[in-house]
Image (spheres, rainbow, N blue to C red):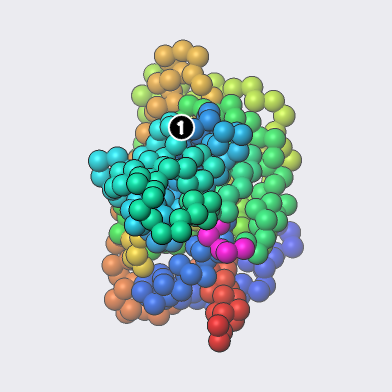
């Protein structure tokens, strides 16, 4: 790992003077009251990614998503016309959860022609229309056309399914994403259908985990045990600085230069990496994915390591230079807990060896992610002591400043708009 020079015009933080350089408070990560404000001001107003279109590949395909932060469960379904729609997962009769299997609080998926309530067998078609009421004649002035499923605003961008719980979203999805994100259009997401998923319940505020993946200052230290001692010691002493940071609207980007794993010295690689020709950086055989979109690798690194796009509030798309990508989701469940989801995407393997190479990369990422989660639970326990009121951030942690400032700005904006309502 090598140090990279700061841009000639100054440090990264100085590019964004509105963020300041003062120590940062973590009160927003330990306050139950602030968490309740976040739920209303952010998670019920912003566009939230809940999955990809590959999860609903044909007519009648559906999945449910439990969203405790928004106090709801939703159904995402591909309708008869091929459109992707979302509904609150609630029957209009007595409020029972409409779609679930053996455990009401667990997510599920499948294919159906209609949704039938387990309680009294009311039925809804794929477009959410109420089509059948058991013993309909016993109801008073029932107009079935008025009692369809409650819709959720739903839009798709590059195969990513987003929902918005506002009565009327303040922006379209594309406006919300902005140019930095839409410049990724054309990446072959649809070719990345080999998928590995894991989740973890983390006893830390959701923003603390996002903070961990917005800087690489920690990498040579926290993840030292993942590398041979001589290499990790040298890396820790040298430090690491990413060559590019960018902030646009509520979203953030950090890019890093890379290494060609197969060119690393033998003592820097694990034996299993040589056997599988894969590791943290991914399979060594880079697929031919065609021309990449202009939004990738803005620092023009060669070799290029990764681009981590942090989409506000809780979604990350991380592109690896080796020709694959992964996503992170951080779903708050309380002021000091959240559900972390990691999903790794590769092109379909053509041989057993390629499959094993993908699995090794996915497992390596899971291991790194759980190391971060363990550290953050220790962080949460101590900042809740309130022994300290604020914390120092270095220049590499500029994106952390932005996330916490942006969170506060959304809360302040919401309170201003709803004052006296």
Quadrant of image for the C terminus: bottom right
**Residue situated in front as seen by the camera: 101 or 210:** 101
Asked if the stretch drawn in magenta spans residue 384, the answer is no
The segment highlighted magenta reads 164-168
At horizontal 52% and vertical 70% (from top left) the residue drawn is 41
Residue 84: quarter of image: top right
At horizontal 67% and vertical 72% (from top left) the residue drawn is 17
From this view, report whether residue 81 is shown above or below residue 407: above
Residue that mark 1 sits on: 113
Residue 157: quarter of image: top right
In the orientation shown, which residue stands out farthest toward the top?
351
Q: Residue 129, how many percent across, how many down?
A: 51, 46
From where the camera sits, is residue 197 visible? no
**Residue situated in front as seen by the camera: 335 or 390:** 335
| Left or right of 352 on screen, residue 384 | left
Q: Residue 201, how many percent across, how many down?
A: 31, 52
At horizontal 36% and vertical 68% (from top left) the residue drawn is 335
**Residue situated in front as seen by the camera: 35 or 386:** 35
Magenta segment, prevailing SS (helix, strand or loop):
loop
Asked if the stretch drawn in magenta spans residue 167, the answer is yes
Q: Estimate how packed mark 1 is, as few (under 14), some (14 to 19) or many (20 or more) residues with alpha carbons within 10 Å.
A: few
Tag 1 secondary structure: loop
Residue 323: quarter of image: top right
From where the camera sits, is residue 30 visible? yes
In the orientation shown, which residue stands out farthest toward the left?
102
From this view, report whether residue 282 is shown above or below residue 402: above
**Residue situated in front as seen by the camera: 2 or 216:** 216
């Amino acid at each position: 790992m090598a140090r990279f020079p700061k841009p000639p015009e100054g440090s990264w933080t100085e590019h964004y003077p509105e963020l300041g350089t003062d120590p940062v408070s973590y009160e927003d990560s330990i306050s139950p009251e602030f968490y309740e404000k976040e739920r209303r001001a952010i998670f019920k107003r912003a566009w939230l990614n809940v999955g990809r279109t590959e999860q609903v590949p044909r007519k009648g395909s559906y999945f449910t998503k439990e969203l405790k932060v928004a106090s709801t469960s939703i159904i995402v379904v591909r309708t008869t016309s091929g459109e992707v729609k979302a509904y609150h997962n609630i029957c209009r009769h007595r409020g029972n959860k409409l779609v679930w299997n053996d455990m009401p609080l667990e997510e599920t998926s499948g294919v159906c022609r209609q949704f039938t309530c387990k309680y009294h067998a009311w039925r809804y078609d794929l477009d959410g229309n109420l089509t059948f009421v058991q013993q309909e004649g016993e109801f008073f002035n029932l107009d079935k056309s008025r009692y369809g499923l409650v819709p959720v605003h739903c839009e798709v961008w590059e195969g990513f399914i987003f929902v918005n719980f506002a009565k009327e979203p303040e922006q379209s999805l594309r406006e919300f994403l902005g140019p930095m994100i839409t410049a990724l259009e054309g990446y072959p997401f649809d070719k990345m259908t080999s998928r590995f998923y894991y989740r973890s319940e983390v006893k830390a505020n959701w923003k603390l985990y996002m903070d961990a993946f917005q800087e690489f200052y920690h990498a040579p230290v926290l993840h030292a045990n993942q590398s041979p001692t001589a290499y990790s010691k040298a890396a820790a002493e040298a430090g690491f600085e990413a060559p590019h940071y960018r902030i646009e609207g509520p979203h953030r980007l950090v890019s890093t230069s890379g290494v060609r794993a197969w060119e690393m010295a033998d003592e820097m690689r694990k034996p299993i990496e040589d056997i599988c020709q894969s590791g943290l950086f991914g399979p060594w055989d880079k697929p031919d994915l065609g021309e990449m979109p202009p939004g990738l690798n803005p620092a023009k690194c060669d070799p290029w390591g990764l681009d981590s796009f942090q989409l506000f509030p809780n979604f990350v798309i991380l592109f690896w230079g080796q020709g694959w990508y992964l996503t992170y989701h951080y779903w708050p469940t309380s002021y000091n807990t959240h559900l972390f989801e990691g999903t790794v995407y590769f092109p379909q393997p053509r041989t057993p060896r390629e499959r094993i190479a993908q699995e090794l990369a996915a497992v390596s990422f899971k291991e790194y992610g759980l190391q971060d989660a363990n550290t953050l639970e220790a962080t949460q326990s101590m900042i809740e002591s309130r022994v300290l009121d604020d914390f120092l951030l270095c220049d590499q942690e500029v994106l952390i400043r932005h996330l916490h400032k942006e969170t506060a700005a959304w809360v302040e904006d919401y309170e201003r708009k709803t004052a006296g309502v």
